[in-house]
Image: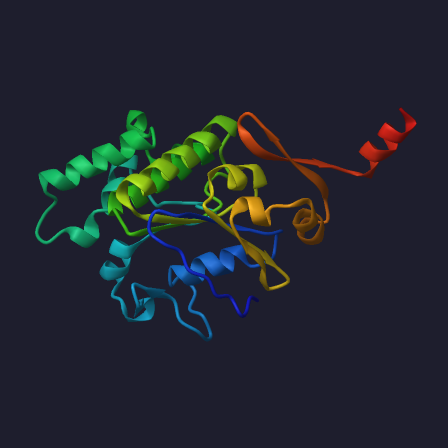
Amino acid sequence: MISDISFSAESGELVSILGPNGCGKSTLIKSLCNVMRPRSGRIDIDGCDILGKTPDELAKLIGYVPQTISSAGYTTVYDLVLIGRRPYVKWNYTTEDLRIVADSMITMNVNAYMRQDVNNLSGGQRQRAFIARALAQQPAFYVFDEPTSSFDLRNQLDTMRIMKSLIERENACLIVALHDLNLAIRYSDKVIVLNDGGIYDMGTPEKVITPTMIKDVYGVKADVLEDSHGLFVRSYDDDDDRMEDRA
C-alpha cells in the first residue's frame, strides 16, 4: 500500500524509483500505466488525466515493460515488436512502421533472433524484446519495472546507456524502478526513494543517494565514493568493520 505520492517527471529526464522489496515500487509503476487504478488522486500527462484515455491513446503516451514476463503466448520476436505499432495502424502496417520495428530490434540487439519464439529465449533476451516493443511505440514516456533484473552486467549497462541516449535524443522520459543503486546514481537525472508506503526523499542522485539514506531505507552500511568515472556506492557489513579493527 502506498499513499501521498506526488512527483513530476519531465521530457528528457531519466527518473529512477528506488527502495527495498515490498516498498511499493511495482505498485507505483503499475498505477502510472493504468494497469492498477489508484484509489484516489490523479496521474496526469500534459495536464490530462490518463484515466480518460483510450487504450490506443495511452499506448502512444506510455511504453510499459513489466518486471516479470512469464509467457508471451506463441509469437516471434518480430511479431512481438510489431505489436508496438498497432496504436498507429489504420488499415495496414506501412513501410515506416516496418522501419521503426527494424530499428527498435537493432537498438536492443534482438534482430538476430527475430524469427524465434519469444518463449524460447533466455530471460534477458525476452526482456530486451519487450523493451524493443516499447521503443516501437515511440511514446512520450517509458515506464519500466526493474528492466535489468534478468540481465548480466554488460547488458545492464548497455540498456541504461541506450535508454539514456534515446530519451535525450527524442526528448522523451523514462521512469524506471531499479534495485541497483550504482545504475541509479550513474544514469538518473532524478531519483525517488520509497519507504514505508511513501516517499522517503527525492531529488538528484548526488543529493539523495547517501550513506544515511542507504542505512535508513535498506538497513545497510555504505560509503558513497567518487573516482574518475563518477560516484559509486560501496556497501559493507559489521564484519568488515571488525576485520579492519583487528588489522
Q: How many marks?
A: 0
Q: Which residue is drawn at 29% across and 63% down?
A: 46
| Rendered image quadrant of residue 223 | top right
Outermost residue, left side = 91
Judge from the rendering whether residue 222 lies leftward or rightward of residue 94; answer left or right: right
- Here the colouring is rainbow
Measuring from the top left, give residue 83's x and y in whole percent: 24, 46
| Rendered image quadrant of residue 44 | bottom left
Outermost residue, right side = 246
Q: Residue at x 54, y 31 (%)?
A: 230
| Rendered image quadrant of residue 110 | top left
Residue closer to the observer: 202 or 136 = 202
Report if residue 43 is visible in the image: yes
Q: Residue at x 30, y 36 (%)?
A: 77
Report if residue 115 is visible in the image: no
Judge from the rendering whether residue 17 lies leftward or rightward of residue 132; answer left or right: right
Q: What is the quadrant of the C terminus in the image?
A: top right
Q: Where 196 falls versus 91 (above or below)?
A: below
Q: Residue at x 57, y 34 (%)?
A: 231
Residue closer to the observer: 212 or 57 = 212
Q: Where 5 falls versus 71 (above or below)?
A: below
Outermost residue, bottom side = 40
Measuring from the top left, give residue 39's x and y in whole percent: 47, 74
Measuring from the top left, give residue 120's x and y in whole percent: 39, 33
Judge from the rendering whether residue 178 lies leftward or rightward of residue 104; answer left or right: right
Q: Where 156 falls versus 141 (above or below)?
A: above
Q: What is the quadrant of the N terminus in the image?
A: bottom right
Measuring from the top left, give residue 139's x and y in whole percent: 27, 50
